[in-house]
Image (cartoon, grey):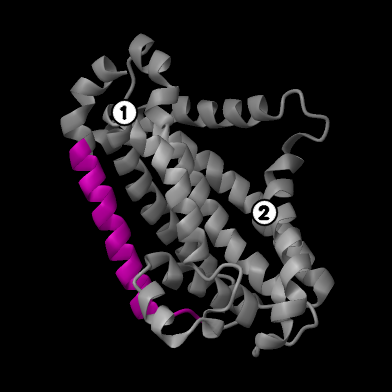
Amino acid sequence: MLESLKGTWRYRQFITTSIRHELVTRFARSRIGGAWMIIHPLSMVLIYALVLSAVLAAKLPGIDSQYAYAIYLTAGMLGWSLFSEILNRCLGVFIENSNLMKKLVFPKVALPVIITGSCLINNLALFVVILVVFAILGHFTPSTLPWLIVLTGITVLLALGLGLLLGILNVFIRDIGQLMPIVLQFLFWFTPVVYPAEIVPEALQTLIAFNPLFHLIGAYHSVLAYGHAPSVAALVGLAVLGAGLLFVSAILFRKASPEMVDAL
């Protein structure tokens, strides 16, 4: 693992250039450029808000705003979009860059690092827009905003640890790449992103509490929607889980790395 970190540092210029090139290439022929980074997640928020707000707006105590549901939903989508984007992109990172891995000599771990950097820039852009939207709606939670640095770090740990693990396995078992989008759809609805956990039947609440994202997205809601500090105990548990996943992924990566190019 230490060697991977050293290799990543040695190739930091390559990583930085790759992130910039990826962002430029993605919007090279687009008339509105990088605005698409925030249009997609915000459009999902708008759709859910318009469809469900009339049903759920009265069931959000603690948010003093007529736009309570839109605020709640937007807060949850900030965390979910970062997690799902890193996970989805890590899933196919080695397959999509197979030609690059065969032609150039560089630490392969740089590829998920590049993805993470790009996703963080996207998430930062979305966060800035969310702050503007909240300001327009008259919703301010400045005292709890520093917690977002911690939440972002934990989200990256979980998404990168799980994504790298699945991305390595996907090189050898391609069914994983087909299965995970379906799993993510179920995971989205078993995570209280678009609904408050309180409206779920008590028996089901106990079940979904085993989902780590239940606590992560709940922390985003606490910080952005309710203006409360999140549960430190829950965050510590999530950080330990994310670090454990990343450690297991690093071990698997080290063992599988020599065979990955041949498998591709």
Q: Residues within 10 Å of mark 2 (few under 14, many from 20)?
A: many
Number of marks drawn: 2
* Residue sitting at the far bottom: 61
Q: Which residues are magenta?
A: 229-252
Quadrant for residue 26, please give it: top right
Q: Identify whether 138 is placed above or below 101.
A: below
Q: Is 258 positioned to the left or the right of 7 in the image? A: left
Q: Quadrant of the C terminus?
A: top left
Q: Quadrant of residue 216?
A: bottom left
User: Residue 246: image x %, image y %?
Assistant: 28, 49
Q: CA distance from mark 2 to mark 1?
A: 31 Å
> Is 31 rendered above or below residue 35?
above
Residue placed under numbered mark 2 in the picture? 126
Which callout, 2 or 1, points at the residue further toward the start of the chain?
A: 2
- Relative image position of residue 15 (x, y in whole percent): 46, 30
- Residue located 37% across and 66% down the image: 212
Which residue is depicted at the point 41% across and 16% down? 100
Image point (76%, 42%), residue name: 35
Q: Is residue 208 magenta?
A: no
Residue closer to the observer: 66 or 172: 172
Residue displayed at 28% across by 56% down: 243
Query: Which residue was labeled with disc 1?
Result: 171
Q: Position of residue 245 (x, y in %)?
A: 27, 52
Furthest-left residue in view?
Answer: 255
Residue 231 belongs to the span the image colors magenta = yes
In the depicted structure, whether residue 16 falls above or below residue 143: above
> In the depicted view, which residue is nearer to us: 255 or 148?
255
Please, what is the three-letter code of the amino acid marked with disc 1?
A: Val
Q: Secondary structure at mark 2?
A: helix
Amino acid at the residue labelled 2? Leu
